[in-house]
Image (tube, rainbow, N blue to C red):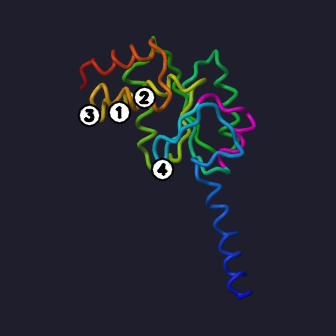
Amino acid sequence: MMRRFALLAAAMSLAAPLAAGVPGEMDPVRIPNYRLIRSDVAVAGQPAPETLRQLGELGFRTVINIRTAGEGAEAEGEVVRSLGLRYVWVPVTPETLTLKDVEAIEAVVEDPAAGPVLFHCSSSNRVGGVWAVIQGRKGKSLEEAEAEGRAAGLRSPAMAEAVHRLLAAPTK
């Protein structure tokens, strides 16, 4: 009986570090509007600097930031890279978002070597819009793409207009 208990305790101690690396399990770390939208992609608002320092421990390999320069992206990049994580910065606003921006982000989230990926802006609204465009480019209807975008954080009418503009644009 004691031997079985010891084996169970040993197995549990080995499993604990693995569970801690699952990006869907963010407690006790807090990131605003954090959502796991795919097994290897999480979306969120702006992580705090101390949270950025914990991302590697949680299993993340890449951080995609779509905030603009005026929102402090440079400092975040330095922190993320100093932790040995990949940092991708594609600054966008609803007015400036292009298919080229979406393609650059899509290339990262579809790269198996990049994941798990944390994809964020300041509140997850722009992230949700970009995610909607990615889904539309994959063949989902506008309604399906918008629903996925809303699930990822899309809220503003301006970002929804950007989604419509890009999904209505002819593709090459």
Residue at left offset 70%, top offset 42%: 29
In this figure, which residue is indicated by the disc labeled 4? 113
For mark 2, give the secondary structure: helix
Which mark is in front, 2 or 3? 2
* Mark pair 2, 3: CA separation: 14 Å
Q: Position of residue 75 (x, y in %)?
A: 70, 27
Classed neighbour count for the residue bearing mark 2: other residues with Cα under 10 Å, few (<14), some (14–19), many (≥20): many
Type of amino acid at the residue the image marks with label 3: Gly
Picture disc at residue 149: 2
Task: Report the magenta residues as a range.
Answer: 45-56
Q: Are marks 4 and 1 in contact (CB under 8 Å)?
A: no
Q: Are marks 2 and 1 in contact (CB under 8 Å)?
A: yes
* Mark 2 / mark 1, whichever is N-terminal: 1
In this figure, which residue is indicated by the disc labeled 3? 139
For mark 4, give the secondary structure: helix
* Mark 4 / mark 1, whichever is N-terminal: 4
Q: Are marks 3 and 4 in contact (CB under 8 Å)?
A: no
Screen quadrant of the N terminus: bottom right
Say left or right for 31 vs 156.
right
41 up-or-down from 49: above or below:
below
Classed neighbour count for the residue bearing mark 1: other residues with Cα under 10 Å, few (<14), some (14–19), many (≥20): many
